[in-house]
Image (cartoon, rainbow, N blue to C red):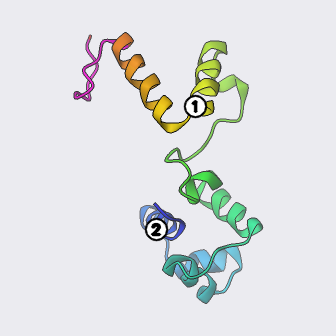
């Protein structure tokens, strides 16, 4: 998903008008419209302001990840969880898929099912 689509979705989710967002961030409405129409890109500082405004990561806005916010505090994970996250992020997408499949096997979850086996 590209930046303009992500931004548009966030506006809709929060029920915020383009005019309100432009006013809140002190940018021209035409500039914001350019972001949404995909013929302009924000500079770094505006990108950061948008991420802060919507409480998402810049990676999420740019379509690099589907995670809205990335944990940056060590307290969010115990040592093993942090290790797993680090390993996962270091792998290429194909290897990440293999790791996830293996985790599902260990968890004893049917990969076609969305509910956990108890």
Q: Nearer the viewer, residue 75 or 80?
A: 80
Estimate the x, y position of residue 91 in percent, counting from the top left: 58, 31
If the image is split into quadrants, where does the N terminus sit?
Answer: bottom left
Magenta stretch in the rendered image: 107-117
Q: Nearer the viewer, residue 89 or 53?
A: 89
Mark nearest the camera among 2 and 1 is: 1
Residue 47 found in image quarter = bottom right
Residue 81 on the magenta span: no
Q: Do we see residue 50 in this rendering?
A: yes
Q: Residue furthest bottom?
A: 30
Query: Sequence order check: which comes first, mark 2 or mark 1?
Result: 2
In the picture, measured across the screen, residue 52 lies left or right of residue 5, that is right
Residue behind mark 1: 91
The numbered dot on residue 2 is: none
Estimate the x, y position of residue 12 in percent, counting from the top left: 42, 67
Residue 22 found in image quarter = bottom right
Q: Is residue 40 above or below residue 62?
A: below
Estimate the x, y position of residue 50 in percent, counting from the top left: 64, 64
Neighbour tally class for label 2: few under 14, some 14-19, many 20 plus, Cα within 10 Å: some
Instruction: Name the magenta segment's main secondary structure.
Output: loop
Q: Residue furthest right?
A: 45
Label 1: which secondary element: loop
Q: Nearer the viewer, residue 29 or 80?
A: 80
Tell me what residue is drawn at x 71 percent, y 79 percent: 26
Q: Do we see residue 56 in this rendering?
A: no
In the picture, measured across the screen, residue 30 lies left or right of residue 112, that is right
Q: Is residue 15 above or below residue 72?
A: below
Q: Is residue 14 above or below residue 73?
A: below
């Amino acid at each position: 998903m590209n930046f303009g689509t992500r931004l548009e979705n966030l506006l809709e989710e929060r029920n915020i008008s383009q005019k309100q967002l432009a006013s809140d961030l002190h940018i021209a409405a035409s500039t914001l419209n350019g972001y949404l129409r995909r013929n302009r890109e924000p500079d770094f500082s505006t990108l950061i302001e948008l991420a802060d405004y919507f409480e998402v990561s810049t990676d999420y806005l740019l379509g690099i990840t589907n995670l809205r916010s990335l944990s940056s505090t060590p307290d969010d994970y115990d040592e093993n969880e942090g290790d797993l996250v680090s390993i996962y992020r270091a792998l290429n997408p194909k290897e990440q898929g293999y790791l996830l499949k293996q985790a599902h096997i260990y968890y004893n979850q049917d990969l076609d099912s969305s509910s956990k086996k108890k």
